[in-house]
Structure formats: structure tokens, C-alpha cells
């Protein structure tokens, strides 16, 4: 009976080992690529994850909380963000101001073996993209380790074989880009992170 | 005879510990009792590097003013924890649980001392995490 509140608290989201706190990504509800939509996946090496932490404890709102990594070589906590450094797992301790642990979550870090691209609504890019001059499309890279999608915002490098047909524009997120069709022609976009990369052909028509 | 009774009384009152969290897949986090002749002599904990383990302390009810000290915090750290759960202290009464967390920091063995009304010792062994799968394959191929 005394575990009933724990079972109730454990019914949603990425709940900690003590069943008292949840850890989700900071993102808007209409962001299809956001980690809020699913339990926290392993973080991609080299990526950042901005967590939003809350507790579900009867009789109290969420107290002041701070995060701390048990294994900073695997996963560091810097400025409230989780920084994935090496493959492995680390407990993220969720503590009150006085250092009392309210909960902890074991977070995994994995290398990126594959990158895919999708539109902002989550639809995967499976072939070439055609744009008319003046049109644009926003692309989001998704990072995978085998069949498992990884979480985290990466600093992937975007490049084009020819910059004439399109402009690659920042879109307010470190990994997302907006491709703006400038002039008729063809180009190939490459998105690379570490040893993993993907390409997509873009054709711009008048 | 008197010393045996005193020993019995002391061992009966020493804090008992219970595991409150699980290990993540492929990692260790386990509490074990090491039995003496009459009762638990001490506890053993095996925990992987980077893994946290929550324990509760009971001493005829939740331990009061529990303080846990590690001989070597570079191997295993301890933190007080706030586990919001009630624990029975008699057939009719309950009290808030008394909890702490052990964090495996570096492979090795050390001792933790749990001080409440009485003291209890935990021998903690921190084990290294297994190598990533691709390194395991390489090691198997090299044999």
C-alpha cells in the first residue's frame, strides 16, 4: 500500500529510479522531433540535451532542483544542459538545494552510426527534393545508432557541392537548417557529425 | 552468557537496509546481506561505475538522523535522499522513510559506515562498465 503513490507517479514519462521525478526535453508541444514525445532515448555523442525536470510528490510543488552527473566523463552537466561525451551510462542525480537526492535517472550515451533527414513535421526525406525559386524547406537531422533513434541536439556540419541554387540558412536551432531556393540548378547537401554523414540531392526549378 | 545476550541485543538493533531502486540494463546495483551466526553481520553492495542505488534504513522503524560516510568517496559516494514514502513502525503507526543513495564513481572496493542509533557497515564494490559492443566483438575476434 505504501508503494501506491510510487506506482501512480511511475505511470508517465521518463520517471526516475525513485519514482519521484520526471525528465523530459525542453520543447514546444507541436515540435514533432522533440524528445518530449517519447521516453528519453540515448544521447548522441557530441550532442546536447536540455532537460526539463519536475517532481510528482504528494503535497508539494516541485522544489528547487539541480542536476549532477555521476560520471562526468560520459555525461556532463553544464548550464543545465546534458552534454554527451563518451559511450556509456551515467546517473543524473536530481537534488534539492541542500544536496538531498530526490531522484535519479540513468541516461545512456551512444555513438552516431547513421544520420537521416526529415522535414520539421517529422516526415522522413527518402529521395531528392525539388524546389521552385523562392521556396524553402526546413530539414532536421535525426541521429541513429543502428535502429535506435538518439536524442540530443547536435552541432552537425551542413555543406553543399554548389551554393548557387540554394542558401543554407540557420533556423534558430543548432542542428536544423532552412534551405532557400535561389536560382535554378542542382546541388547535393551533406550533413555530417563525426564519422556519420548523409546526403540529399536538391533541384531548383524556375 | 551475558555477553551473548548483549551481542544479540546489539545486532537486533543495528540498522537494516533495503534496496529501493533497480540497476539499469546491463549494469549492477545490488544489495546483499552477509549473515553472521545470529543475524546480518554486514551488507555488501555491488554497483557499476556511474550507477546510483537508493537504499532505505530501518532501525525498528525508519532510521533517525542517519549519516552515511564513505571511506573513499573517489570509489563510492553517498548522498542523503528524500524518499517520500511512509514506512511502518508498528502495526498501527507509520513514519517517513529514511533513505540514502550510493553512487559508483570508480572501480574498486571501499566501506561505507551507516550511523543512526547504531552503526552498520557496507562493503561496496564498484565494477567497471562492460566495453561497448564493437570493442567486445574485436576482443572476441582477436582470441
Image (cartoon, coloured by chain):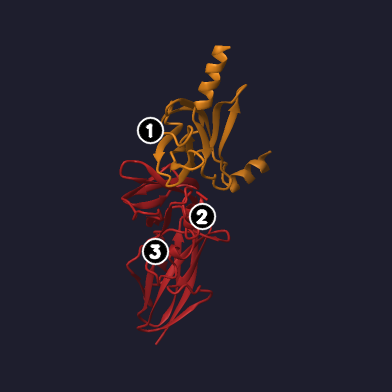
Q: Give me the chain letter of mark 3.
A: A
Mark 3 → mark 1, Cα distance in angstroms: 49 Å
Q: At x 54% / y 47%, what residue is drawn?
A: B24
Q: Give me the chain letter of mark 2.
A: A
Q: Label 1, on which residue?
A: B65
- Res B59 visible: yes
| Left or right side of B7 for B118 | left
Mark 2 → mark 1, Cα distance in angstroms: 27 Å
Tell me, what hue is chain A? red
Tell me, what hue is chain B? orange
> Is mark 3 in CB contact (under 8 Å) with mark 1?
no
Q: Quadrant of the C terminus of chain A?
A: bottom left
Among numbered discs 2 and 3, the one appearing first in the sequence: 2
Q: Label 3, on which residue?
A: A175
* Front residue of A165 and A142: A142
Q: Relative to B32, is A126 above or below?
A: below
Q: At x 45% / y 45%, what residue is drawn?
A: B86
| Quadrant of residue B142 within the rendered picture | top right
Q: Label 2, on which residue?
A: A7
Q: Secondary structure at mark 3?
A: loop
Residue A19 location in percent, x, y? 47, 51
Q: Residue furthest bottom?
A: A206
Q: At x 53% / y 76%, what residue is drawn?
A: A127
Residue A171 location in percent, x, y? 34, 69
Q: Secondary structure at mark 2?
A: helix
* Comparing labels 3 and 1, the label whose residue is closer to the camera: 1
Mark 2 → mark 3, Cα distance in angstroms: 37 Å
* Mark 2 surroundings within 10 Å by alpha-carbon count, few (fewer than 14), some (14 through 19), many (20 or more): few
* Front residue of A200 and A102: A102
Q: Give me the chain letter of mark 1.
A: B
| Quadrant of residue B65 within the rendered picture | top left
Q: Relative to A115, is A121 above or below?
A: below
Amino acid at each position: 500500500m505504501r508503494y501506491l503513490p510510487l506506482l501512480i507517479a511511475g505511470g508517465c514519462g521518463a520517471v526516475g529510479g525513485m519514482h519521484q521525478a520526471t525528465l523530459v526535453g525542453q520543447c514546444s508541444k507541436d515540435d514533432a522531433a522533440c524528445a518530449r514525445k517519447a521516453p528519453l532515448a540515448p544521447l548522441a555523442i557530441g550532442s546536447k540535451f536540455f532537460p526539463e525536470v519536475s517532481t510528482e510528490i504528494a503535497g508539494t510543488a516541485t522544489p528547487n532542483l539541480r542536476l549532477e552527473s555521476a560520471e562526468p566523463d560520459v555525461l556532463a552537466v553544464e548550464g543545465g544542459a546534458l552534454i554527451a561525451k563518451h559511450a556509456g551510462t551515467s546517473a543524473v542525480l536530481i537534488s534539492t538545494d541542500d544536496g538531498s537526492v530526490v531522484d535519479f535517472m540513468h541516461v545512456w550515451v551512444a555513438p552516431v552510426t547513421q544520420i537521416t533527414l526529415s522535414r520539421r513535421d517529422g516526415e522522413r526525406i527518402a529521395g531528392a527534393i525539388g524546389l521552385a525559386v523562392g521556396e524553402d524547406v526546413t530539414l532536421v537531422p535525426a541521429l541513429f545508432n543502428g535502429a535506435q533513434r538518439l536524442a540530443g541536439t547536435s552541432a552537425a556540419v551542413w555543406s553543399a557541392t554548389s551554393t548557387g541554387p540554394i542558401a543554407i540558412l540557420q533556423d534558430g536551432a543548432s542542428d536544423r537548417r532552412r534551405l532557400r531556393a535561389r536560382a535554378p540548378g542542382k546541388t547535393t547537401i551533406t550533413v555530417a557529425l563525426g564519422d556519420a554523414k548523409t546526403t540529399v540531392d536538391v533541384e531548383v526549378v524556375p | 552468557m551475558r555477553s551473548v545476550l548483549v551481542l544479540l541485543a546489539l545486532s537486533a538493533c543495528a540498522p537494516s537496509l533495503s534496496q529501493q531502486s533497480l540497476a539499469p540494463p546491463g549494469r549492477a546495483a545490488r544489495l546483499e546481506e552477509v549473515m553472521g551466526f545470529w543475524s546480518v553481520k554486514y551488507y555488501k553492495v555491488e554497483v557499476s561505475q556511474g550507477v546510483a542505488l537508493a537504499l532505505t534504513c530501518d532501525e525498528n522503524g525508519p532510521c533517525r538522523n542517519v549519516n552515511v560516510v564513505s571511506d573513499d568517496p573517489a570509489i563510492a559516494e553517498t548522498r542523503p535522499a528524500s524518499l517520500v514514502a511512509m514506512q511502518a513502525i508498528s502495526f498501527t503507526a507509520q513514519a517517513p522513510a529514511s533513505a540514502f543513495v550510493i553512487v559508483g564513481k570508480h572501480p574498486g572496493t571501499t566501506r561505507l559506515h551507516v550511523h543512526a542509533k547504531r552503526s552498520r557497515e557496507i562493503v561496496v564494490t564498484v565494477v567497471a562498465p562492460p566495453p561497448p559492443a564493437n570493442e567486445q566483438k574485436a576482443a572476441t575476434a582477436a582470441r
